[in-house]
Amino acid sequence: MSYIIQGETGDWEVVIGLEVHAQAITNSKLFSGASASFGSAPNENVSLVDAAMPGMLPVINKMAIEQAVRTGLGLRAKINDYSVFERKNYFYADLPQGYQISQFQHPIVGEGTVTIDLEDGTSRDIGVERLHLEQDAGKSIHDQDPNRSMIDLNRSGVVLMEIVSHPDMHTPEEAGAYVRKVRAIVRYLGTCDGNMEEGSMRADVNVSVRKVGETDLRTRVEVKNVNSVRFVMQAIEIEAQRQVEVWEDGGEVVQETRLFDPNKGETRAMRSKEFAHDYRYFPDPDLLPVKLETGFVDKIKATLPELPDEKKARLISDLGLSAYDAGVIVADRDTAAYFEEAADGHDAKTVTNWLTTNLFGALNKRGLDIGDSPVSAEHLGELVGLIEDETISTKIAKDVFEDMLETSKSPGDIVEEKGLKQITDTGAIEAIVDQVIADNPGQADDVRGGNDKAIGWFVGQVMKASQGKANPGQVNQLLKSKLID
Amino acid sequence: MTDQWTIAKAADALEKGEVSSVELTDAHIAAVEAGRSLNAFITETPEIARERAAASDARRAAGNVASPMDGVPIAMKDLFCTEGVRTTAASHILENFVPTYESTVSGNLRDAGSVMLGKTNLDEFAMGSANITSYFGSVKNPLTPEGANADLVPGGSSGGSVAAVAGGLAIAATGTDTGGSIRQPASFCGLVGMKPTYGRCSRWGVVAFASSLDQAGPLTKTVEDAAIMLQSMAGYDAKDSTSLPMELPDFRAACTRDVKGMKVGIPKEYTLDGMPDEIQKLWDQGVQWMQDMGAETVEVSLPHTKYALPTYYIVAPAEASSNLARYDGVRYGLRVPGDSLDEMYELTRGEGFGEEVQRRVLIGAYVLSAGYYDAYYVKAQQVRTLIARDFENAFNEVDVLLTPTAPSAAFAKGEKMDDPIAMYLNDVFTVPASLAGLPAISIPGGYDAGGLPLGLQLITGVCQEETLFRAASALEMAAGGGQ
């Protein structure tokens, strides 16, 4: 768990804080009625307000407030009944108003906690400092014309929730686990789709290093706009290493904003012009402070789904799963939902094994998400049911599963069509056993002579003769009674 | 002659069929053309006016009169965005900007049936008190004496609107008031200028100067006209988060000219050192009139008044510096190309904004900047709260406050122009009510030695417009106006 960088002058530890920007799922933008959907043609989802036409005024989208509160509750955080939108002033071509409307001194959500799950099965609590709402900016596109930049304002005004952690993390793994957990929580809540490739979730990573044993924090650097869990972890490793080298070379780390370049495996400072120094925040006079009505928060609280931590605890205590398996299953809302449907009425551990070993492996190989699985949760449950009631053996079940992956048919149909039903009729099995013993007198004598291990060979022969359908337990028992007893 | 018309008279004549809207409109279009030397209009819209006048006459013929404003030709301050009609805010940076949308207030007036004659001149982005900062040139006060060496200013920022009404070019006009931009020019031109409670008129579609202060209102020849026109302009608008979600009272019915038993406060802090005797005399006369009509007058104290002007000149520029950031040459308006984005900003804004606008943007950016924010902006907001509390305390005692509107009559163009502070002092009596968001009205009270009009200001508490119209209609009568 500890992550120590061994420098020439001693051991260094890393201090990490994260700002996760999550695009809230809303019917429209934060202050306008324009659509917030992804993938439209450039400048298709732009209202007069988003383009900052003269005299246009923002009106708060109530759903954005609800989603922020919902997310705050999911982060087990304090919900502030009073919050204020302020203007963050800076000039950029894709910022039509010349300011971003954001929350600064009075965010809608205060202190909370995210419990992260680590590889070794342990958990840790990471403090959340705040969640605030803000508008996204538009997009500048620089590679379409040799002389001009193109501006797409579709994102301008889209609702972002910025979730700011305390500098509580000390390893890249913890930071990765934190991002994954925040993503799981917002997906469970339905407040953000967590899709980092499409940019609906991204992270600014604050990194500093200090000598082991130091209690004060050294200067931090902000690595901006990191857009995958893997890159978050890599950026921390690379940036921490860089800072150790700077300090050890007798230099000083400067507080700055840097960009992570995954291709070159380095972070580099943004030109000072790429970010403003003085945002001249002040409360937006076009908007009134947000005051939540009594009962508003409780009403949302009453509709919260079971969240990953609660679900994990229930899977462990009620279904007897290991902490690790439970952690894997709850990490993703779709996986958890799949599991719960498949395990309904069936042995949870058996379902877990099929899910995490067989299905995950198959999906990985095909590059599919659980949502696109050719094997439905219902069918996987049915397959486990066929094993449980001894309709088929585990071995046959694997063949049936392969068939299910190919055809998406129900396991019952496959067993029926291919005649794979297990033979449990003792008479029928005995006939095969007798035949195999009769065909192999030498091996039979070997067993009778005391070589108990050779009985395994007979089992294999009988199974082969039955095309795998004989109940292996019964086969074993019959062979023993005929050759040993 | 167009001078004779008030909204009330026009409505009456239209109703009786003595005149049609087309006739009334044509007469005013002719007056607009004849009065071009005033430079009251930036954009004249005679075609739109004739079209709307004809539509009004047709409505009337069909018995569907929309309001007492139906068919009445008015002028629109060029700060209200008007669909398909150039809207400039008197700035080079918006010189060729044609909105695709109609501001709520101008839309309300259109829906009320009024006829827009054109878009009136103003100080650039409504920043000024003399209408001398317009990119389209200064406006001449129609009361400038024949043969004067220099034109008198009409006041500002709604200078084009008052010149149009006082010059008989329009029966009434819209104004906007941030620190006095309706009341002070009304005082300079002998008109009634009314700023309602902040939030009564929607700011949607009005080019923003200082969002927490900007408020639209009517500029008219009589108090009754102001009441009629405000009725059509105001109302809750969900598109403006600061709009008041309240029903409107009947403003015209409140013009009872009856102040018997009303308590009128005379704020002692409004007596300024070096204030012209004429102003003091007018104020005293106003007090006398109120007493004569049966009102009780008492001295009240608004102790934080002296901080109002400096507070205003922190809050308004701060908001303006941010509100005007959108004029960057990227999406609309003037663009002066540069070799980089920053250079384009610098050239566009340097060329697009006039000197006064640049001055206020710089002041605003300064008072909001790190290290100064607490000392200026935060402090100003605190003082603003104290100023509002002063008024609240006063209105626990009295119904209405009576003050002068401006510290002088209209002055000649050229005076006070190289001293911004002297110019800012024009707003000393109007700014406090703006900071507190209170309704206030200027009515013609008398004349200075040179025969130029002087205004008296009445202020009431939040949403007490009915009391305001009651007192104003009485005071107007006492001063011999309102006929």
Image (cartoon, rainbow, N blue to C red):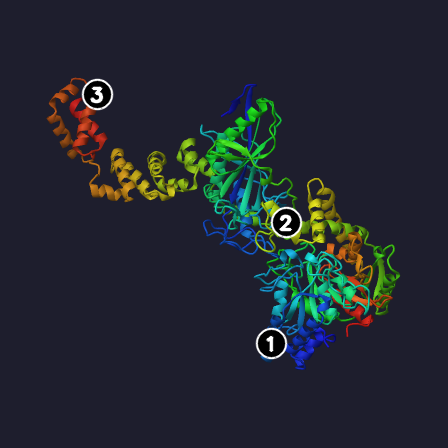
A128 over A140 or under it: above or below: above
Mark 2 is surrounded, within 10 Å at the Cα level, by few (under 14), some (14 to 19) or many (20 or more) other residues, namely: some
Q: Is residue A211 left or right of residue B303?
A: left
Residue A420 visible? yes
Badge 1 element? helix
Find residue A115 and report its horizontal and vertical position in percent: 51, 34
Counting the numbered discs, the total is 3
Q: Marks 3 and 1, Cα distance to the nearest angstrom? A: 110 Å
Find residue A469 and report its horizontal and vertical position in percent: 20, 35
Q: Marks 2 and 3, Cα distance to the nearest angstrom? A: 93 Å
Tell me, for residue A453, which label it has, or none.
3
Residue A102 visible? no
Write down the chain letter for disc 2. Answer: B
Q: Amino acid at mark 3?
A: Lys
Write down the chain letter for disc 1. Answer: B
Judging by the rendered image, the residue that carries numbered circle 1 is B54
Residue at the farthest top position: A449
A199 over B238 or under it: above or below: above
Judging by the rendered image, the residue that carries numbered circle 2 is B347
